[in-house]
């Protein structure tokens, strides 16, 4: 998934780090609440001019949550 908060270009770098840490923590909490380990790879990316920063997350989701309904 890609996450790009709307007002991120107006944030200080330290605020961006805190925001992305909170997002990753929320993903981990979701995993724990649903009974699977939080396993993910993440990367921050921005345009060459420093704008448009966003977070890419590849997260393992337990098999039982991937079944078609």
Image (cartoon, rainbow, N blue to C red):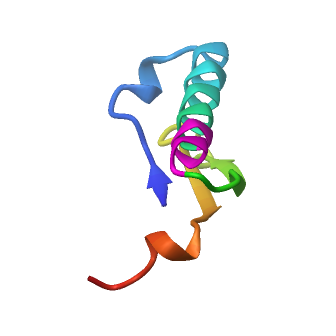
> Which quarter of the picture shows residue 27?
top right
Tell me which residue sits at (51%, 50%) in the image.
34
- Asked if residue 5 is among those painted magenta in the image, a careful observer would answer no
Please state the horizontal and vertical placement of residue 39, each as a whole percent of the image. Answer: 72, 56
Q: Main secondary structure of the magenta part?
A: helix
Tell me which residue sits at (64%, 56%) in the image.
36
- Asked if residue 30 is among those painted magenta in the image, a careful observer would answer yes
Q: Which stretch did the figure color magenta?
A: 28-34
Q: Is residue 22 above or below residue 60?
A: above
Q: 59 or 44: which is nearer to us?
A: 59
Residue 21 in the figure: left or right of residue 41? left
Q: Quadrant of the C terminus?
A: bottom left
Q: 38 or 55: which is nearer to us?
A: 38
Please state the horizontal and vertical placement of residue 33, each as a whole percent of the image. Answer: 53, 41
Residue 57 in the figure: left or right of residue 51? right
Please state the horizontal and vertical placement of residue 12, each as a whole percent of the image. Answer: 58, 14
Q: In this view, does 63 lie above or below 9?
A: below
The image shows a total of numbered marks equal to 0
Please state the horizontal and vertical placement of residue 35, each as a whole percent of the image. Answer: 59, 52
């Amino acid at each position: 998934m890609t996450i790009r908060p709307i007002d991120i270009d107006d944030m200080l770098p330290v605020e961006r780090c805190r925001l992305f840490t909170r997002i990753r923590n929320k993903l981990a909490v979701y995993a724990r609440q649903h009974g699977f380990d939080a396993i993910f790879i993440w990367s921050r990316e921005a345009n060459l001019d420093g704008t448009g920063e966003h977070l890419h997350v590849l997260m393992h989701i337990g098999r039982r949550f991937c079944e078609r309904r």
